[in-house]
Image (spheres, rainbow, N blue to C red):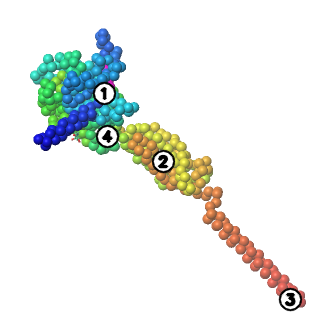
């Protein structure tokens, strides 16, 4: 009897802990509700209205009791408060749920969504069993961006007309809103999707499309039509998705075999269901630091009064922003800047990487180079700082070194000795002559 009551108590505790845990991960999201201002007949620039809105999010359905416990702040119109059921917990990521009182908040926008026909090549999706009654509801699309680019999310939600209780039907998300890659490496652009299994749109086919966009230019990278199990023809090579993962876990990640400079840009992952679509954008940056060389190599000896023109060539880098400069490290081990030198414009190689160089005129006197030292070319780049060093020797410098002084002393001593010796020899021969004369005279 007591055992049963203990098991009963434990299960109640476990149950409440489970509910706390499952409830705690889901945020209360503040969003902007953005829609076209009513009463405008379209045109190029449709005025938009923006209202504060709030989404309570749970993985289970709401009961009257739970809803009466939730108190939205007074500055948000009750008509813009939503009680969202998110069975897969797509909103319940830490990236969308920062600790209370944090300055940075996730970005979130809700728009009314109109279920529609598909783009032409996926039109085959819509001829399946349709559910017009199902479509007659309030549809919303939510775009949310987590902190630190950890998550970007696009959800389509459906609420029975005027109910304020939407349910997530389609969710497309990426955990890599920004990807940086070195040149030549394989790249994974994350994209995943989830469809509510209880929805009529589930199981009637899906399509996935990856598009590339850069400075207004766009192209189709990859498109997979799940209904007919075929890929659309594209000119892109070396881009793939894992079909098994796509069906088993909704993993629509794009794999680029070998990153190139031309891959830099924005990639849009779009998932199409009959009448619905959602998309997320992933930015790819190919970042490759420069290789440096100093010319001439090795540096010739520098004679004071002469100028020596040296050049640092930075090549193979991307993106093109680079900061070139020169440093000198003397015999005392101290480094100082010699300035930027004369920096040339960029040149672009066929692989898309850039090169740039800097010329510097070395003047031993003006630059206080002493007897020489290390000349370093410093290149600061988004991919890291690179350095190249060459040794510079300055010859015949006026300021004598210790060895020079000692040599001079030695030479001076030698000269002194020679003079002394000569003087002694001559003077002694003179004296012997006179001695002889004296002897003769005697
Ligand atoms: C999605 O697929 C890619 C490629 O197969 C894989 O590297 C990645 O880990 C998968 N992502 C998830 C969340 O399973």
The x, y position of residue 276, in whole percent, is 20, 24
Q: Taking 361 as reference, is 379 left or right?
A: left
Q: Which residue is mark 3?
A: 439
Front one among 32 and 186? 32
- Which type of secondary structure does the marked residue at label 4 adopt? loop
Rounded to the nearest whole Å, what is the CA distance between mark 2 and mark 3? 83 Å
- The image position of residue 140, as x and y in percent, is 24, 22
Residue identifier under label 1: 29
Tell me the number on the disc at residue 260. 4
In-front residue for pair 402/14:
14
Q: If the image is split into quadrants, where does the C terminus sit? A: bottom right
**Total count of labels:** 4
Q: Provide the major secondary structure of the magenta segment.
A: strand
Q: Residue furthest front?
A: 1
Q: Is residue 31 a member of the stretch shown in magenta?
A: yes
Report the magenta residues as a range. Answer: 30-34
Q: CA–CA distance between discs 2 and 1?
A: 50 Å
Foreground disc of the pair 2, 1: 1
């Amino acid at each position: 009897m007591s055992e049963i009551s203990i098991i009963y108590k434990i299960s109640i505790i476990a149950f409440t802990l489970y509910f706390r845990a499952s409830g705690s991960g889901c945020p209360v999201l503040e969003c902007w509700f953005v829609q076209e201002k009513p009463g405008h007949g379209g045109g190029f620039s449709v005025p938009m209205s923006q209202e504060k809105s709030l989404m309570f999010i749970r993985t289970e359905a709401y009961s009257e009791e739970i809803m009466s416990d939730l108190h939205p702040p007074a500055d948000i119109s009750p008509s813009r408060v939503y009680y969202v059921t998110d069975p897969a917990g797509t909103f319940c990521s830490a990236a969308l749920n920062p600790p209370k009182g944090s300055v940075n908040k996730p970005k979130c926008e809700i728009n009314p969504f109109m279920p529609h026909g598909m783009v032409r090549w996926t039109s085959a999706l819509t001829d399946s069993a349709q559910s017009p009654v199902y479509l007659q509801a309030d549809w919303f699309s939510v775009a949310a961006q987590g902190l630190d680019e950890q998550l970007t999310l696009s959800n389509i939600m459906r609420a029975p007309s005027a109910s304020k209780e939407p349910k997530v039907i389609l969710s497309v998300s990426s955990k890599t809103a920004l990807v940086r890659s070195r040149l030549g490496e394989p790249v994974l652009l994350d994209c995943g999707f989830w469809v509510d299994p209880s929805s009529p749109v589930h199981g009637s086919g899906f399509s996935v499309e990856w598009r590339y966009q850069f400075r207004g230019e766009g192209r189709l990278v990859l498109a997979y039509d799940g209904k007919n199990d075929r890929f659309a023809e594209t000119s892109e090579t070396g881009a793939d998705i894992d079909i098994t993962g796509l069906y088993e876990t909704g993993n629509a990640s794009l794999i680029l075999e070998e990153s190139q400079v031309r891959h830099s840009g924005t990639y849009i992952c779009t998932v199409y269901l009959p009448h619905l679509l959602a998309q997320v954008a992933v930015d790819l940056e190919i970042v490759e630091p420069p290789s440096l060389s100093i010319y001439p190599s090795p540096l010739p000896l520098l004679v004071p009064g002469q100028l020596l023109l040296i050049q640092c060539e930075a090549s193979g880098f991307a993106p093109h922003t680079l900061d070139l400069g020169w440093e000198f490290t003397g015999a005392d081990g101290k480094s100082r800047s010699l300035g930027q030198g004369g920096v040339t414009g960029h040149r672009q190689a066929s692989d898309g990487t850039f090169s740039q160089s800097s010329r510097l005129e070395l003047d031993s006197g003006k630059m206080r180079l002493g007897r020489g030292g290390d000349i370093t070319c410093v290149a600061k780049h988004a991919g890291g700082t690179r350095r190249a060093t060459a040794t510079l020797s300055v010859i015949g410098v006026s300021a004598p070194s210790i060895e020079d002084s000692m040599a001079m002393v030695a030479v001076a001593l030698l000269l002194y000795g020679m003079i002394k010796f000569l003087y002694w020899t001559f003077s002694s021969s003179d004296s012997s002559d006179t001695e002889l004369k004296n002897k003769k005279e005697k």
